[in-house]
Image: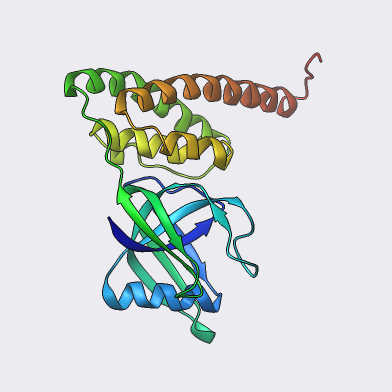
Amino acid sequence: MYELPLFPLNTVLFPGTPLQLHIFEERYKRMINLCIDQRQPFGVVLIRRGVEALGPLAETYPVGCAAQIVHVQRLAQERLNIVAVGQKRFRIVSVDQERQPYLLGTVENLPLEDIPEEQIEQQAGALRPLLVRFIRALMEAGGGQFDLQQMPGNPVSLAYVAAALLQIPPACKQALLEINRADELLDNLQFTFRKENALLKAILSEQDVLQSGGFSVN
């Protein structure tokens, strides 16, 4: 177990995925500057009850992801823009709200259970085309750009990138983060991406009908 400063957010961070934050509150400027000076990570945890900013410290879910700061842009009034990358999952054992103006968690790492590599390679192989179809549909719908050549080869890394890209509520992403078996995570993602791809296909078809001057039957 070890101590980790905690940053409650309305977003879920997955291992290996990036997070961009604008830091403007005094308590979090203090926390982030300490992390920068000591080259230590902070913990990203999803808010269960409460608010991100300008309010009492929020109540969080028990499982989060450590974030290592990789880029810092210093702004006026000591504000910061940072980019961090998700590292290891952790579980909160206890929380201290007294020593600092932000949450300090005593946490333990939460590695995935060992699963035969051949099994998860097969599952990742089934997930990959679903993810590619999803990304291409998002780009077609104007959802930005994604270099498909940068898609991870490692099954677990692929799963976490896929989970981060999903357009689902944060609580649903939290459920994915809390899964402790890679095979279960990959199965869940396959099921979810089949649904999301069907939804995106329907949305794009509707857009095509509207742009062509036709109409759909409701």
Q: What colour scheme governs how the chains and residues are painted in the rendered image of this protein?
A: rainbow
Residue 75: x and y in percent read: 48, 81
Q: Quadrant of the N terminus?
A: bottom left
Q: Residue at x 47, y 29 (%)?
A: 134
Horizontally, residue 123 falls left or right of residue 62, namely left
In the rendered view, would you say 138 is above or below 51?
above
Who is closer to the viewer here, 97 or 208? 97
In the rendered view, would you say 196 is above or below 104?
above
Who is closer to the viewer here, 179 or 83? 179
Q: Residue at x 30, y 78 (%)?
A: 37
Q: Residue 158 lies in what quarter of the image?
A: top left
Horizontally, residue 134 falls left or right of residue 71, namely right
From this viewpoint, which residue is outermost toward the bottom?
Answer: 77
Q: Is residue 86 visible?
A: no
Residue 115: x and y in percent read: 22, 24
Q: Residue at x 39, y 20 (%)?
A: 187
Residue 67: x and y in percent read: 35, 58
Who is closer to the viewer here, 3 or 185? 3
Total labels: the figure holds 0
Who is closer to the viewer here, 83 or 36? 36
Horizontally, residue 185 falls left or right of residue 200, namely left
From this viewpoint, which residue is outermost toward the left?
Answer: 117
Q: Residue at x 29, y 67 (%)?
A: 40
